[in-house]
Structure formats: C-alpha cells, structure tokens
Image: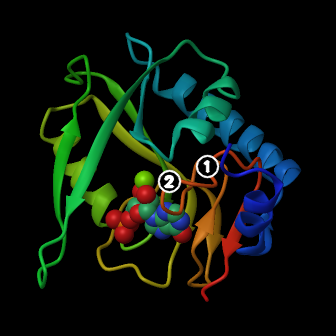
Amino acid sequence: MKGGPQAEMKVNDRLKRVVFGEKELQRRIRELGAEITRDYKAIGGERPPLAVGLLRGVVIFLADLVRAIELPLEFDFITVSSYRAADSPGELVLLKDLVDPVEGRDVLLIEDIVDTGRTLKFIQEAIRARSPRSLRTCCLIDKTPRREVEVQLDYVGFRLEENEFLVGYGLDYAGLYRNLPYIAALKTK
Ligand code: IMP
Ligand code: MG
C-alpha cells in the first residue's frame, strides 16, 4: 500500500500553524447559527429558508452551520469552476446548478472562504437574477488582502488579514487536507 505514516508526516510537515482550532470553530459556528436563527425568524417567509452551499469546500462548514440553525430549512449545492486561459483572468462557469428554483425563496448563500471575491460575486449575481425573495451571504472566512471586487457579506465567521493559504475543515490544497478538523496555514516553501 502506498502512503502510510511516512506520507502522513510529509503532509503534516507542510502546515505552518493552526489558525482556527476545532473548539474555536465550533464556538463561532454556534454564534453564527444563533444570529441566523434570530434574523430568519424575524423575516418570516412563507417557505423555509433555502441554504445554498458552494461545493466542495463548504460541505464541512455547511454541515455544522445548518445544525446550529434552529429553524426548518432546506439546503442545496452549486458548483463553480474557473477556467484560466494563459493570460486572462479565470472565467467562471456553473458546473452544477441548484435542483429547485429559487424564485420567491429566502436564500442564504454559504461559502467557506472569500479571497478576491470573484467567485461569490458571480454566484450572488446568478442567484439575484432568479428573483429570490431575499439573498444573504454567510462565509466562514473573509480573507481580505487580495480582494478585487466588493461583495456583500452578511455573516462572517472570521476575518483573516494575513495573505495566507488556509487548509482544513473543508479547505483544500490540491484536493488534500479537507478532512482536518481545524484550519491551518500552509507553508509557502
Ligand atoms: P475568490 O474567487 O478569489 O474569492 O476565491 C474563492 C475560492 O478560492 C474559494 O471558494 C476557495 O475555493 C478558494 N480559496 C481562496 N483562498 C483559499 C485558501 O486560503 N485556501 C483554500 N481555498 C482557497
Ligand atoms: Mg470554494
């Protein structure tokens, strides 16, 4: 079998520091859940809110967050991919759309991390074009240094002022590290 303890050590050697520990994540998510519960009780739509998660990074956060929201709700997923040509900025394409229409729904968009803001902006515009009753956005991490476009963020778990690449708790580097129960910064070299 390939891998084993040797490979595991190499993977973990690439972590620089733990940025948000497991307990800190869980505590903050409970707070976000309570805030969202309060707000969505107040807006009182006829149908339950629809949480929309952006695959794949969001799955762990979404799973914890929806269990901290004490209201009936539905959730669905969307996948976006960025195709980068040699010298143009990536063009965003919808790879997997929502199953049900969002017209008239109270949509809560859930994202793991916002960096340049382009991905979130693209999805917010796509959803807004379908006339939801309301649209709010919740992100776990607002990574500010490389922001290129302004995006509306209604609920933010943590703000990161350092330009670090984070992994764990759903966030990946080359497909790995998503299953870490905490968030760490990757070594740059
Ligand atoms: P944006 O369009 O530049 O805001 O990029 C957002 C997307 O890039 C996120 O949905 C993540 O998939 C990915 N991303 C940005 N920063 C990080 C990071 O530090 N770790 C892992 N993924 C990241
Ligand atoms: Mg993502």
Give the structural element (helix, strand or loop) at label 2: loop
Q: Which residue is drawn at 61% across and 82% down?
A: 161
Relative vertical location of residue 39 with respect to residue 173 in this rendering, above or below: above
Res 129 → quadrant: top left
Res 107 → quadrant: top left
Name the kind of residue labelled 2 in the image: Gly
x, y percentage for residue 43? 46, 27
Name the kind of residue labelled 1 in the image: Arg
x, y percentage for residue 166? 61, 68
In this rendering, position of residue 102 left or right of residue 60? left
Q: Tags 2 and 1 in contact by the CB under 8 Å rule? A: yes
Say the numbered circle drawn on residue 175: 2
Residue wearing tag 1: 178
Quarter of the figure that contains the N terminus: top right
Q: Which of 57 and 27 is in front in this view?
A: 57
Q: Mark 1, residues whose alpha carbon is within 10 Å: few (<14), some, or many (≥20)?
A: many
In this rendering, position of residue 18 left or right of residue 90? right
